[in-house]
Amino acid sequence: GQGEGGSLRRTLGLWQLTMISIGATLGTGIFVVLGEAVPKAGPAVTLSFVIAGLTALFSALSYAELAGSIPVSGSSYSYAYATMGELIAWICGWCLVLEYGVSVAAVAVGWGEYLNEMLDGTIGVTIPAALSAPPGDGGVFNLPALIVVLLAMAFLLGGARESARANTVMVIVKIAALVMFCAIGVQGFRSGNYENFMPLGMAGVSAAGATLFFSYIGFDAASTAGEEAKNAQRDLPRAIMLSLVIVTALYVLVAAVAVGAKPWKGFTDSEAALAQIMREVTGQTFWGTLLAFCAVIAIASVVLTVLYGQTRILFAMSRDGLVPKVFARVHPKSGAPRANTLIVSLFCGVLAAAVPLGQLADATSIGTLFAFALVNVAVVVLRRTKPDLPRTFRVPLSPVLPVLGFAFCVWMMGSLSTVTWVVFGVWMAAGLVFYFVYGFRRSRLAPSEK
């Protein structure tokens, strides 16, 4: 029943799936968004990471149950389709396009900052602001952001197994980089930096948490690989939980060291905060440059894995007839959806080159929180409607944890700015128009006029 699209190849084991999830998650948040979050919460930013991590954890449990029982490509879009019908699935898929497509762009913007740090420290040259920042951030066109998206595209055209291999190497580099940061940063630790722990109160902690939630986006990337996993039912739940635990531990550790080494008021809107701390603590440029080099690799791997997730979600939506058929065409030799990959990469590349980071990050967070809220609902619905469905993993204490997951997501969404809500509203309205004009009539579930 694959239609004329063709099917994806099963080549990925538990190790690769966990690496895809860590690859898609670990990077931007800690390397880039930290600089935006610290001024909102002060030293309590460590607490913000824990709260954002808990929100992700509750949703991850729900993801794991659904991934174990509905192991197809397309992540929460496919789960919503199977549980709550086509319209809700479309809304979910449309949010995922915001989550993946826009976060590729957001991540790529941060990549340029670290590339400049690295070039400055090695050859003493930087890309001029006109070509390394988007309009509105003092530039004309963000060239590095476009370049990193095109690089990721080149890997993806080669197929899932090759992309997974490149990603694993990059993940090991970035974990090593963060451990190195902690080892060096802790030498500049001043306990005095923690004296006024929560200067802006709980509201500051939750506002920073909502921004930092961006750092956890991507653990669901393993669930977009449902049809390329060798043993999806067993490995997907494990990969999702494992990656989330590793990422949360690293985040909290790095944030604790960063605030200990630099007074919280010293974090301005610098996107390359960690490299600067390294330079200040050691008094040498070498370590900061090395960290910037690792960040360049780390963030490139996020672009790669998130772009991968976006193409697989559109593949699933296309197979259901909700977006044009071209997105489900699979190349016979590489087993990759080629036209899909080209279209998505060019769209994300142009977005990355033209829009500033903060707006992109918050828009991504709100889309993701909405999709996660739906996943928590889907678990409860599916337990009611299909109690006998085989489940390789069950959320403990259901429906308590899914309801908590839903509540956390809604609370986080409430902490985001009005502008972000307006952008989200416009995006959803556009999506509904597209659905009723295009998808509704062409979908597999449409009354057959064929």
Image (spheres, rainbow, N blue to C red):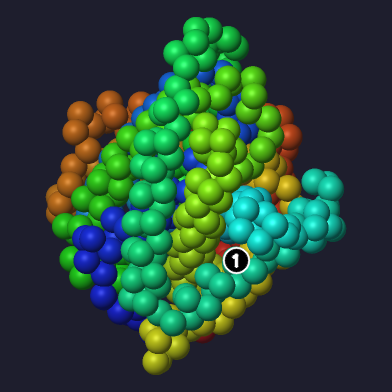
**In the foreground, 291 or 129:** 291
- Image coordinates of residue 201 in percent, x first then y, are 55, 10
Residue drawn at the location 51% of the way across and 35% of the way down: 282
Vertical side of 294 occupied by 370: above or below: above
Residue drawn at the location 41% of the way across and 48% of the way down: 177
Q: Which kind of residue does numbered mark 1 sit on?
A: Val
Vertical side of 322 occupied by 23: above or below: above
Vertical side of 127 occupied by 444: above or below: below
Residue named by callout 1: 148
Residue drawn at the location 15% of the way across and 52% of the way down: 392
* Horizontal side, residue 280 vs residue 187: left or right: right
Task: Locate the N terminus and report the quarter of the image it occupies.
Answer: bottom left
Q: For numbered disc 1, what is the local secondary structure?
A: helix
- Image coordinates of residue 444 in percent, x first then y, are 46, 72
Examine the image and state in which quarter residue 111 appears: bottom right
**In the foreground, 191 or 236:** 191
**In the foreground, 241 or 61:** 241
For residue 368, say whether it is visible: no
View extreme (top): residue? 195
